[in-house]
Every structure is written in structure tokens, then in C-alpha cells.
Image: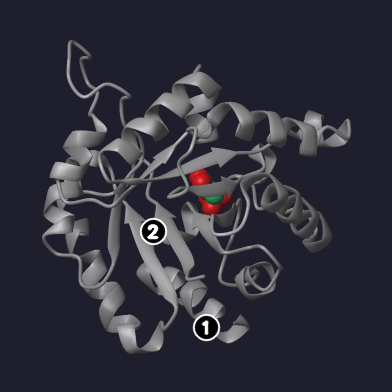
């Protein structure tokens, strides 16, 4: 299974950032990232320019609407994301779930992505109070059951404990391992399971070496290409 290193730029960047894949490629040429897929998810505004300038890096969106078209001001459809040349779309990120996005909406978005030839990255993860109450595995199982599109195997799952996103806090290696084993039992073989939440060059090697961690979804540390390259290199070292 190829490892996926996915960068979520969130609402960062400007038009000059379309050159970042080239910068990444010069820091870490493809010959030095055997077995690793690198994906950058910029703000939607930059998708088309970035797919025209990919330099061996996949490009994805951070969200899509579940319908193909219609009166949905400010939204973009999976069909539009595909038309812009992208290959992936993140759905159900906790920052969107916090804004009211339900499992049902996430499932519909993921299904639309699959229909249009995109691979959805379905995000799940527990809050701190849920973890402290011993409910983390049950919460994640329920989110997966309700968010995964039926019968689709071309999906990626990202386990992102909410309390680890952008905080510098990371679960123990044991907790990451047991959650990823738990998710593996639910999603079956062949689905890549990413870990997300404060992955940095300094902890990437240890996290990416855990069984059933098939890559990482990275926010803050993905904005600098040097840091993204170091995280990518950690895979090569650990595999
Ligand atoms: C994320 O937003 O998906 C994320 C994992 O962010 P960070 O790496 O900054 O914790």
C-alpha cells in the first residue's frame, strides 16, 4: 500500500503559492520518495492553477457540495473539483463538522466525490471529553458507519482527534496504534488510514512507523515545503 502524505493548507496562501509543488520537487525529487504519494489541498481558488503545475504532486480540494449543480451560493461541486484537474477531496474535517456538517452530509459528499472520480478523504475523530470518557473508539466507529459511502472502496480515512489538531498535542503511539487497528477492522484491507493532528518533522517518523498508519494529514506543518519534505522523508526512512 502506498503511503499518502496529505497537506491541508486550510485558508492559507495566495496566488504565488501555486509554485510550491515545484519548490517541493526541488527539495525532494520524485526519485527520493518511492512508495509515497504526496497531496496538497490548497484553497479552492488555486486548484486549477495548481493542477496545471503539479510536478509529481497530487492536488485535492478541502470540501465539496454533494449536489452536482444548483442554487448553492459559495459552494463547489465534486464535478467542478474534478474538472479543475484534482484527484482528492477532504470531507468532514472537524473544522467543518464543528460548523454543523453532519455525518449524513459527509456521506453524501463522499458519495458525490466517488461518482465523479475523486478519492474522498473522510475525516473522523473524537473530542477530548469523549476520549477522557473512554468513548473514542465508539465515537469513531459511529462516525465511520454514518459517513462512509456504501459500497465504495476507493476512499481514504483520516483519523484526526479533534484535541490534537493545531494544538501540538499528540496521542501516545499506543493510542494511535490501537485506534488505527480499530479503524482497520471497520474499513477492511486496502483503505488507507491517515493519522492527523500536530504531525511535525520531529514526530513524523515515529507516528508513520505505527502499524495501520498509512500516511498523514498535515495542517500547520504543511505550509512550508521544507517541513513537508522532512515529513515525507520520514516515511521513506520508516518503511
Ligand atoms: C488538520 O487540520 O487536518 C491538521 C491535522 O492540522 P495540524 O497538523 O495543524 O494539527
Left/right of residue 165 with respect to residue 33 in the rendered view: right
List the residue tagged with mark 1.
Answer: 236
Of the numbered discs 1 and 2, the one sitting upstream in the chain is: 2
Q: From this view, report whether residue 104 is shown above or below residue 231.
A: above
Q: Nearer the viewer, mark 1 or mark 2?
A: 1
Local secondary structure at mark 1: helix
Mark 2 element type: loop
Q: What residue is shown at x 22% (from left), y 21% (from top)? A: 74
Q: Is residue 68 above or below residue 4?
A: above
Query: 172 or 111, which lies in front?
Result: 111
* Residue 99 x/y as whole percent: 49, 20
State the image quarter where residue 201 is shown: bottom right
Q: Tell me the residue at 26%/35% (across/down).
A: 78
User: Is residue 1 at least partly visible in the picture?
Assistant: yes
Q: Residue furthest top?
A: 71
Per the image, the residue denoted by label 2 is 223
Question: Residue 43 location in percent, x, y?
Answer: 27, 42
| Crowd around label 1: few <14 · some 14–19 · many ≥20 (10 Å) | some
Number of numbered discs: 2
Q: Residue at x 62, y 47 (%)?
A: 187
Q: Is residue 29 visible?
A: no
* Spot occupied by residue 212 in the image (x, y as percentages of width and height): 67, 63
Quadrant of the drawing holding the C terminus: bottom right
Amino acid at each position: 500500500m502506498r503511503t499518502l502524505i496529505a497537506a491541508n493548507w486550510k485558508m492559507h496562501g495566495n496566488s504565488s503559492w501555486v509554485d510550491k509543488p515545484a519548490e517541493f520537487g526541488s527539495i525532494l525529487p520524485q526519485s527520493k520518495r518511492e512508495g509515497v504519494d504526496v497531496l496538497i489541498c490548497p484553497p479552492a481558488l488555486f486548484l486549477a492553477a495548481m493542477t496545471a503545475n503539479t510536478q509529481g504532486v497530487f492536488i485535492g480540494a478541502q470540501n465539496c457540495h454533494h449536489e452536482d449543480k444548483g442554487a448553492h451560493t459559495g459552494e463547489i461541486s465534486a464535478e467542478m473539483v474534478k474538472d479543475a484537474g484534482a484527484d482528492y477531496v477532504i470531507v468532514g474535517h472537524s473544522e467543518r463538522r464543528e460548523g454543523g456538517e453532519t455525518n449524513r452530509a459527509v456521506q453524501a459528499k463522499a458519495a458525490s466525490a466517488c461518482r465523479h472520480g475523486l478519492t474522498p478523504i473522510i475525516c473522523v475523530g473524537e473530542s477530548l471529553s469523549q476520549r477522557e470518557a473512554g468513548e473514542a473508539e465508539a465515537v469513531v466507529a459511529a462516525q465511520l458507519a454514518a459517513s462512509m459511502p456504501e459500497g465504495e472502496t476507493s476512499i481514504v480515512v483520516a483519523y484526526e482527534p479533534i484535541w490534537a489538531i493545531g494544538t501540538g498535542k499528540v496521542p501516545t503511539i499506543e493510542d494511535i496504534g490501537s485506534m488505527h487497528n480499530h479503524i482497520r477492522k471497520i474499513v477492511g484491507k486496502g483503505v488507507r488510514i491517515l493519522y492527523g493532528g500536530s504531525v511535525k518533522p520531529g514526530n513524523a517518523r515515529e507516528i508513520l512507523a505505527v502499524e495501520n498508519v498509512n500516511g498523514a494529514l498535515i495542517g500547520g506543518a504543511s505550509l512550508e515545503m521544507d517541513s513537508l519534505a522532512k515529513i515525507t522523508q520520514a516515511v521513506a526512512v520508516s518503511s
